Amino acid sequence: MLWLFLVYIVNGEQSSKPASLTYSIIIAIVCSMFLSNSLSNFVIKPLAFDGTLSRSGRYGFVYEAWNTIGSDDVDLSIVAIGSSLTQYGINGSCMKNEYSTESSNTYNLGIPGSYPYLDMVQMNRALSSKPDIILLEVNPISLSQVSDISEINIQLRLMLASLFLERGEYIGWVEILENEHLDYMDYYLDDRLNSENKFFGKSVEELLNRYKNNNSEDEWWTIEPHWYLGVPNPESDSWRNYLIEPPLLSSYLASMDEESLSVYENETIPKQMSRDRYKPNIENNLNFLALEYIVSTLSSNNIPIILVSYPIHPISLSSLDSNQLDQHNSTLDYLQKYDKVESHNYIWSQEWEKGDFYDFEHLDGQGRNKLCTMLGPEIFSNIQ
């Protein structure tokens, strides 16, 4: 039908040359939009997963992940959203064992270096996927000032998001996003191809190299993604398992010798706790506004939210000043005013040991399993 329409315009009666030029421009715009969509799907998007367009494929995987979650046929879908604290903290396989009476999946959508300000962009896709429960990370670092986030990080995340967002998904969160950050996205009509322009050259160069290096044989356009930094292609057999239990690095602390560990515990950790990211201030805080937007949006759509505050290393906890996390605690109280919202703050729990941690703020394998046995029953006891 599109091509019949274009042929009609070209061959139909035209009153003047200016009108003919106008029609030609319209045709060029329409064709470029359809061609761009094709190029994005087949040339650019696949490289967002294997680590070509960014250091980690997780920076751009979340929109296809939501599509998969929406199509999975399970009785209960739980989705964890947040930063690398979530990525390292939630073991979907363990959670599945905790809820064995019916079919369920717990999906881990934690993204390294993420914040509510960046995560809010995915909310409309989340709603269309109809999750049963959302685990939303709310740690002190979730309340960092947006001005403290790397501008390169913001630009990359938003431009990758633009590759996957539909026009109808630019609603709600747009009002919170700063204008200079909205400029990174394909929001305005004259910037509709902004993200494709950003990534097209690098994508073509990479594919030409693959074609040459593989002598155009087999599926030369694909590579095996890096075991940690890469993400399986959404069409691959390993994609769903990856969403449930992503591979993680071996413990950073366990690799240290005794002297290095002593320096880390006595000098590095106290310095980390004195940084602004562990001194939350919610006044004029866009991450706080983004958190409230995420919670209010999910709540108004009748989706239960569990606010999860992941634990920090025991020495990190002992390095905090008195009342240093008061505004974090008050944020949890405030967000619980919305319907279907509850909070589980594990920062202050006494069960955590040094061996539970990858570093001063991320859980390791032992810690993930411990969290699973604590959080799982809290979730599933209200369902069974």
Image: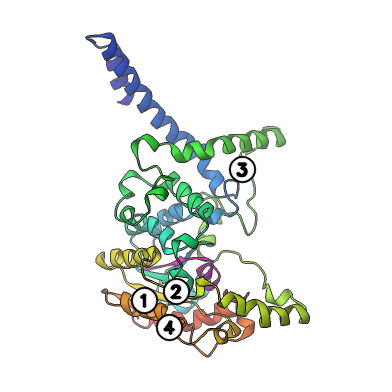
Which badge, 3 or 1, is on the more N-terminal residue? 3
User: Which amino acid type is shown beneath numbered disc 3?
Assistant: Thr
Which badge, 4 or 3, is on the more N-terminal residue? 3
Q: Residues within 10 Å of mark 3 (few under 14, many from 20)?
A: some
Which badge, 1 or 4, is on the more N-terminal residue? 1
Q: Nearer the viewer, mark 2 or mark 1?
A: 2
In the picture of the structure, the residue carrying the numbered disc 3 is 222
Mark 4–mark 2 Cα distance, whole angstroms, equals 30 Å
Q: Which mark is residue 280?
A: 2
Question: CB under 8 Å between callouts 3 and 2?
Answer: no
In the picture of the structure, the residue carrying the numbered disc 4 is 377
Q: Is residue 184 above or below residue 353?
A: above
Question: CB under 8 Å between callouts 1 and 4?
Answer: no
Assign the C terminus to one quadrant of the image: bottom left
Question: CB under 8 Å between callouts 2 and 1?
Answer: yes
In the picture of the structure, the residue carrying the numbered disc 1 is 331
User: Which amino acid type is shown beneath numbered disc 2?
Assistant: Pro
Left or right, 71 with respect to 354, comes to left
